[in-house]
Image (tube, grey):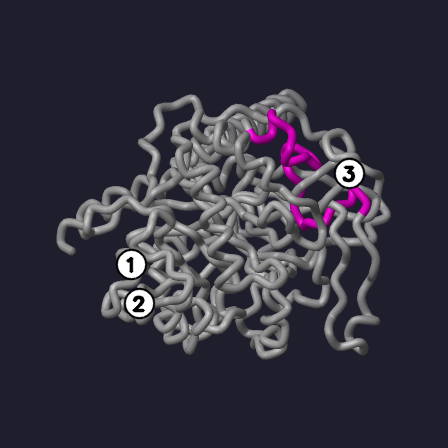
Amino acid sequence: MAKFRRRTCIILSLFILLVFSLMMGLKMLRPNKATFGDPFGLDLLPEVRQRTPHLEKSFDSQKNDKINSEINIKNLKSIEITMKPSKASEPYSEEQPPLNYNLHVFYYSWYGNPQFDGEYMHWNHPILKHWNPKISKNYPQGKHKPPDDIGSSFYPELGSYSSRDPSVIETHMKQINSASIGVLALSWYPPSSHDENGESTDDLVPAILDKAHKYNLKVTFHIEPYYNRDDQSMYKNIKYIIDKYGNHPAFYRYKTKTGNALPMFYVYDSYITKPEQWANLLTVSGSQSIRNSPYDGLFIALLVEDKHKYDILQGGFDGIYTYFATNGFTYGSSYENWAKLKLFCDHFKLIFIPSVGPGYIDTSIRPWNAQNTRNRINGKYYETALRAALQTHPSVISITSFNEWHEGTQIEKAIPKRTTSTVYLDYRPHKPSLYLELTRKWSGIYSKERATYALDQ
């Protein structure tokens, strides 16, 4: 009897060992490069998008049923675990599809650190107050303190870098190239201007153009709403940009249906300026007209509200873009309105440029703005936006953004990082290159589809 029990125990032990081995083997066979992982923690973060005070009051009108909440975890009393930003991982070694010059990405060169700039810039972004003092008092105030505490809910693989660092510019151009994006739309202020959290960056343009050219990229300009921007100052801006940078081989020109190759300029917050002023610059009969001159170009206005499209027409613009990566936040950023906007643009011979993004979260700088967060859902939000854009058969698609870290719209590589007070978001269970890879995939799809419907048009 004892022998029988011993034999039974041995057989049972061997059986358990076999089952355990099979389970471990199957686990090892799970593909590492699956497009999507399990959607755990879809409500982990909250954040919102808004770069302009002119849109602030629209936040209050957002309905809670549109919230995809992502929660940045603060005040954690755990041991600090920091993954030091190391050398940037190399882009993909496999063969890449050709660059898509009808795919543009918004790029920001306003970041600074003590090594290259003498101080931190933008990484130490202040926490913005709500316009209602009663609400504002419920949230923290002050500024972020890099390098471990930055004004972002994600943490860059390159750390709190400087946009002046030549190795950073090089790495960025490699990453954009690896995503099969052909054009970067560079955030630009005139030489004497800058945003409230940085310094003038026009002197960086030559280095960006040179590195872009090295990776066969083109550069267009995203003109920011500097103080007192009007038709006269814009005339000087366009003349300056074309005279100084127009002969560089990386300077972007868009080939129109008439065969002309014209510079393209995105104009952020264009609706701030009255259409009559824009008409002075952008219509043939305007007092400051650049039409049919060496400084002519394609001027793309930001559409936020439906009514803006008529101002855009009156102002003489050549097209519209939607910028915001928050579906449902504005009329222009809502996918359900893109087909109507495309029909409007086709009717009036305007270029329609929908803007897509991987998600949105800006609670690190606007902690009261959680209702506008858009969860990335392991890349599904991004792919949904790209699919919606393609359905409109656009001539150009813009991506918000390569590296707008404050608003969590970046496709640049991010890494896991935890400190005693913050757990940063990341792209796990996927690699830091997830959004570059997804962009490359959809760049190829867009190229093929555009070739088909462009012939039909």
Give, as a three-letter code, the residue at label 1: Gln
SS for dot 1: loop
Mark sitting earlier along the chain (1/2): 2
Q: Amino acid at mark 2?
A: Ala
x and y percent of residue 39 in the render? 53, 51
Q: 209 or 229, which lies in front?
A: 229
Q: Amino acid at mark 3?
A: Pro
Q: Kindly identify the residue that appears in the image at 51 percent across and 35 percent down.
A: 433
Per the image, the residue denoted by label 2 is 339
Percent from the top left, x then y, of residue 276?
43, 73
Query: Principal SS element in the magenta part?
Result: loop
Secondary structure type for disc 3: loop
Residue 244 % position (x, y): 48, 38
Which portion, as a residue range, is magenta?
A: 145-169
Would you say the residues marked 1 and 2 are in contact, meaning their CB atoms lie under 8 Å apart?
yes
14 shown above or below 64: above
User: Is residue 147 shown in magenta?
Assistant: yes
Q: Earlier in the sequence, mark 3 or mark 1?
A: 3
Write down the quadrant of residue 43 in the picture. Answer: bottom right
Whole-angstrom CA distance, mark 1 to mark 2, is 8 Å
Which element type, helix, strand or loop, lies under badge 2? helix
Residue at 35% across, 54% down: 298
**Mark nearer the N terminus (3 vs 2):** 3
Residue at x-position 16% and y-position 56%: 457
Q: Disc 3 versus disc 2: distance between alpha carbons?
A: 43 Å
Crowd around label 1: few <14 · some 14–19 · many ≥20 (10 Å): few
Residue beneath the point at 83% across and 71% down: 137
Determine if residue 343 is in view. yes
Q: Quadrant of residue 67 in the image?
A: bottom right
Q: Which residue is labeled 3 in the image?
A: 147
Cα–Cα span, label 3 and label 1: 42 Å
Residue holding disc 1: 391
